Structure formats: structure tokens, C-alpha cells
Image (cartoon, rainbow, N blue to C red):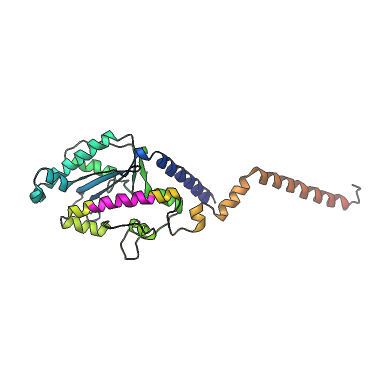
Amino acid sequence: MGAELDRVKDRKRSRALIEDLYLDANRVYVIHYSCESFYENDTGESKRVTSIATRNLKTGQTKSWSIHKEAELSKQLSSMQAELNKFEKSMLKGFFQWLDKHKDCRFLHWNMRDENFGFFALEHRFRVLGGKPVELPDDKKVDLARELVALYGRNYAPHADSRGRKGRIMALAELNNASDQDALPGADEAAAFVNAEYIKMHQSTLRKLDMFANFFERTHEKSLKTKSRWYERNGVHPVVLIEIVKDHPIYTTVIVLSGLAIAAVNFSRFLALFNYPL
């Protein structure tokens, strides 16, 4: 029972957070990035980052950085494969310079929470390349994927869509008829990296920004379609209702009065055994 009550509290906290982000949307950015596959890592080396993008939650204005854009600016697009480290470092430098100017804002992301994939991974990668990253405080990071679990339960979306594309991102987009054109699931993104299709990876990053913003807006409007059951979506569970009633002062009063009434009846019956007049 305690676990269900905790979930109701988490849901209430998440709902309040979504509302707060919506009201402060000018100072909230959706963020995502693409990189080399971190599942296939025989060497233990950090994975190359190929593109990063941010989108203002209010205006939709988007800023992006990518290794192919850095190569183009250096007029080395056709020979970029020979100097990927240089272009990646330049890309990350540009991103962290921008982040330093926006570090008081909050960033809405999807599972960017560890050194495999996340802010820590970006920081580490830049250090490996000789840079000094800006470290964003944890209280400025909001994981939309975790908030959806808090709001709708662990089974809010399958882990693959009807076409077999893995990931809740694709499944949730399908449930809500949200455009996923150019968005690559993990396996396809890994293949794109192997084939040096960096523009395709960049387009995928930009599309996923749109998808996350779409998910957020629908969540705020309470119109997001999920696989959750009614009581999971609305924060009402039979066990929780019982606990809420039990914690209410009226319930306590009724129980006490009922107990006194029962005690009085039993005492009357006891006296009646001895023909004691009442």
C-alpha cells in the first residue's frame, strides 16, 4: 500500500513539474544528441559524438552543432574522415560555449543521465579531446522519459512500435500519430555512423527534438495517448483510495464513535446478564 501512495505522490510532483516547465518555457530547452553506438564497445573508449541540438520549448527556435558542419566551415567536407577528432572537438567547444551562456536554464532530455549517454558522456568526451566542459547542475536537467513513467506508470508504452523499431520513442510517436520522419532507432543510428552518414544522424537528432517537444506539449495538455490503464493515468488506485479514506479525520471520528457504540452495546448486554437495571 505504501508503494502505491508513493507513486501518487511522485505523480503529483511530476504533474507540478510539467506545469512549472510550461510556465517557464522561455527558459527551458529540449536537448538531444547522436553518437557512435555505445552498445558495441570492445575497446572501452568513449564514443564519438556526431551532432547535438537544442530547441527552446516556447519558441521552437533550434540550435545545432555537428561534425559535418564544422568540416564544411573548414572547407574540408570531402576529406573530413581524416580529421574527425578535430571537427568533433570544435563542435563540442561550440556547444559548451553556448551552454555556458544558458546554464541557468533547464534542459528537457530523454534518458541523458549517465556516462554512456548523457551530459556526463558529453563532458567526458570533450575532456578526452582536450577541452574543458561546462558542467550543468543536476537540478537543471529534467528527464522526460522518467517523468512519463511517474505520470503514467512503467507500462505507458511498449518498447517497440508495430514495425518492430525498438525504443519507446518510436512506440509513443506511433500511439500519438506524431511524425517520426528521419528519426532513427538505435540500430539504424549505429549503422549510419558506421557508414559515415553524419547528415542522416543529424537529421534524426533534429526530428527527435520535435518529437520530445510534442510529447511534452501533449503531456501538459493531458492528451498524450499511452497504454496505461485508467487508474494509472488518473492517479487513482483502489488501494490508494482506501489509504486516503483511512487517513481522513472523518474516518477516524467514525471509527472512534463506532467503537464506543459497540462497547456500549456490549456493556449493556453484560449488565443484562445480571438483571441489572439500566
Instruction: Work out whether residue 274 or residue 66 is closer to the camera in this orientation and state it.
Output: 66
Residue 167: name its quadrant.
Answer: bottom left
Vertical side of 184 occupied by 22: above or below: above
**In-front residue for pair 177/272:** 177
Say how many tags the image has.
Answer: 0
Q: Position of residue 22 (x, y in %)?
A: 41, 42
Q: Please state the horizontal and vertical placement of residue 71, each as a whole percent of the image.
A: 12, 46
Q: Is residue 46 visible?
A: no
Is residue 177 rendered magenta in the image? no
Residue 224 appearing in the image: yes
Q: In terms of secondary structure, what is the magenta stretch mainly?
A: helix
| Left or right of residue 5: residue 43 | left
> From the viewer's perspective, is residue 238 above or below residue 114?
below
**What residue lies at 37% left-to-right and 59% top-to-bottom?**
177
The boundaries of the magenta stretch are 203-215
Q: Position of residue 124 (x, y in %)?
A: 23, 42
- Locate residue 77 relative to residue 30 in the image: left or right: left
Horizontally, is 198 left or right of 215 in the view?
left
